[in-house]
Amino acid sequence: MSFGEYPAEVTVDVLDARTIGAEASTDYERLLAALDKHRLRDSRFRAARWLDRHAEDAWIRLVACQHDGSFVGFLAGMPATGHVSIVGTLNPGRGVGSALLTVFSTRAAEAGASRLTVSLDTEPAHRINRRRFFAAHGFTSVQNSAIHLAAPLEVTSPAPFEPEVLR
């Protein structure tokens, strides 16, 4: 997998990391190692809980994959609560983070969450860019916090059940 330059807009597929085949596990680990260069103060992409793609836990690990098969982004969160734990892309500003967040939002709504939440890293140098990203997706400050943000989820009700008439 190459970590080179990407065009202005990147089209990606977002996959549940559990569906990635064994042959791509090295690429998955390389993606997380490359994302650790973001130098988040409070989190690591290569943490054991994110490396374990097959963990039977409440977390979902999403990977953005370009059509050439290269991995370019990662998001981990807990759909049942709507909490986004960590998100990163190799080349921010190309729509990859938005694609990841959109898929996570759908999963959270399906799991019954009524809102999305995120706690921004406490590293102040890059917090403004992270804050702008989430604000662009409808997140606002929770109780005037500089690092705790939330966004309402549009929860759709399932279609009413209509029994089939037997004749």
Image (cartoon, grey):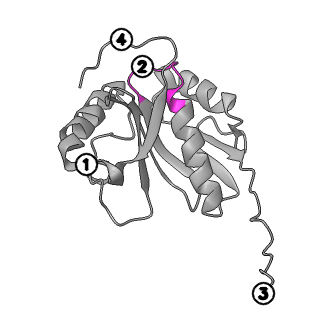
Residue drawn at x 67%, y 45% is 150
The amino acid on which the numbered mark 2 sits, given as a three-letter code, is: Asn
Q: Which residues are magenta?
A: 89-97
The relative height of residue 5 versus residue 52 in the rendered view (above or below) is: above
Q: Is residue 107 left or right of residue 165?
A: left
Disc 1: which residue: 21
The amino acid on which the numbered mark 3 sits, given as a three-letter code, is: Leu
Which of label 2 and label 3 is nearer to you? 3
Disc 2: which residue: 91
Q: Earlier in the sequence, mark 1 or mark 2?
A: 1
- Cα–Cα gap, marks 4 and 1: 25 Å
Residue drawn at x 35%, y 11% is 5
- Cα–Cα gap, marks 3 and 4: 60 Å
Residue 113 in which image quadrant: bottom right
Q: Earlier in the sequence, mark 3 or mark 1?
A: 1
Q: Earlier in the sequence, mark 4 or mark 2?
A: 4
Disc 3: which residue: 166
Residue 135 in which image quadrant: top right
In this view, the residue in front, 136 or 144, is: 136
> If the image is split into quadrants, where does the C terminus sit?
bottom right
In this view, the residue in front, 11 or 143, is: 11
The amino acid on which the numbered mark 4 sits, given as a three-letter code, is: Glu
